[in-house]
Amino acid sequence: MAAPEDHTTMDHHSAESDQSHDLSDKLEHDPKLKDFDLEGGRRLSHARVAVDSSSTSESVGRQIEMEAENGIKYRTCSWQKTAALLFSEYICLAMMSFPWSYSVLGLVPGLILTIFIAGVVLYTSLTIWKFCLRHPEIRDVCDIGQYLFWDSKWAWWFTAVMFLLNNTFIQGLHCVVGSEYLNTISNHGACTVVFGVIVAIISFFVSLPRTFGTLAHLATVSAFFTFISVLLAMIFIGIEGHPANYPEYGEPQVLAIPPKGTSFVTGMSAFLNISYTFIGQITLPSFIAEMKEPRDFWKSVTAVTIAEIILFSLVGSIMYAYTGSQSGYMTTPAFGSISNELYKKVSFSFMIPTLIFLGVLYASVSARFIFFNIFDGTRHKTQNTVVGWASWAGILAVLWILAWIIAEVIPFFSDLESIMSSLFDSFFGFIFWGVAYIRMRIADDGYSFYKVRGIRGWIGAIFNVFLILVGFYFLGAGTYASVMSVVISYREGSVGGVFTCASNGL
């Protein structure tokens, strides 16, 4: 694994060390600065001090030491706990959209894109990790946004708005899927709007823990039950030998290439569905900020990426092989393609922990961001106060109400995934991290870094400019395809209306 950063000259290294010692001296003699380092580095973030790996450990060590007397401690995650959080984020219900994506793209392009996106996400995740090691005072992706774009406050606000919208949309997605589950298991026992409210209320209460260390235990349970759920789904569809609604649409067609007549809108939506499942870098700075040893983060993200490639490819391929390309057989999520009602309900039921937890995880990330910015430097952040807990609960309540509204306005799974992928993953999956790489290289070697670093510099520069262009393509063509897909869904009547009581069960 590559070292966190490169230093090409002793002078540059010495300069950074001097800056680090100066920072240490200021922290020792200025209690206010010491407090702000502990409370998330909001004041230090404007100093923009680049540090090496040794000073990173010292800075993190100071934060942990100063948290010792706090009622609520934040830097508590080992790399194993962080891996559990990542598993719960990535090994989730969204993988059950892979069979549909493969049915649209064809098996070979689908598998190639799966591996390609996984590789890009791992590469950009390691870029984030290296950037956070240089700046251990970073608490979230909004701090990174301000760092990347020349300490501009508009960049911080833009990133903050996109950050909160992304997370709230994901919460909304889980309200949608939760209502789908309750409709499926109860045979539409109540109004769908009511089911959405029930999911939001349950999720609110599960969101109340204030540290990722506490949530890591729930994350492990979520990832385990998700694995059992998709394993059962694959076994059941294999036992049946044919999908739901068979033989109405003929024998299932399994194709290596896209089916004839696949439109740009449908193909792009399928690609965005694959991308959405992999792209989750928006939470990584928040996770790294609560690790006891941030230098171990590469272990967490590498282990999860390997598991993703294996699991997503198997789920997509096996479910597609038994379901086929016909739209009458394929559903998203793919549980609806299981013809036996008992099999479908049993496999879907094991997904309950992740239906709740993943929305909870993103709600916690958003609430933490808002809470830290309101109470930075106060005892309400680090101690168990009535004001602190009441504010935390109030923030979560607002977030879940907004998520429920989104779920009722865009009440369909695959199109909501595509919209989130095109609007938010364009920035947080590609553009930001291409810029982060370039900024780090310029800091090390100047604006001609691609010449100084030789072939590595040229390859790195070209690839990261390519990532930025891919991000803009997602934003432009992806958003167009996503919006058109929503329009087509409403026009064809394939989904219910806004705030409808109609069943959305599988």
Image (cartoon, rainbow, N blue to C red):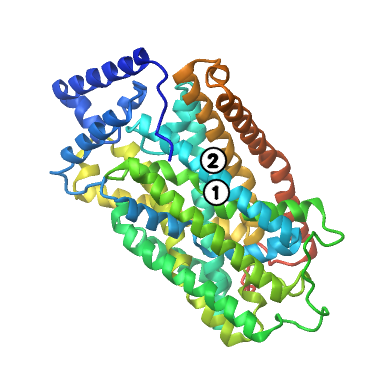
Q: Amino acid at mark 2?
A: Phe
Residue 279: which disc? 1
Determine if residue 326 is in view. Answer: yes
- At horizontal 57% and vertical 74% (from top left) the residue drawn is 191
Q: Is residue 41 above or below residue 106?
A: above
| Few, some or many residues within 10 Å of mark 1 (<14, 14–19, 20+) | many
| Residue 331, percent from left and from top | 68, 70
| Few, some or many residues within 10 Å of mark 2 (<14, 14–19, 20+) | many
Determine if residue 403 is in view. Answer: no
- Is the N terminus in the top left, top right, bottom left or bottom right quadrant? top left
Q: Secondary structure at mark 1?
A: loop
| Residue 203, percent from left and from top | 41, 63
Q: Check the image and name the residue furthest to the right.
A: 261
- At horizontal 79% and vertical 84% (from top left) the residue drawn is 247
The reply, left or right, for residue 278 in relation to residue 60 is right
| Pick the front one: 313 or 477 | 313
Q: CA distance from mark 1 to mark 2?
A: 8 Å
Q: Is residue 398 above or below residue 195?
A: above
Quadrant for residue 246, please give it. Answer: bottom right
Disc 1 to disc 2: CB gap under 8 Å: yes
Quadrant for residue 333, please give it. Answer: bottom right
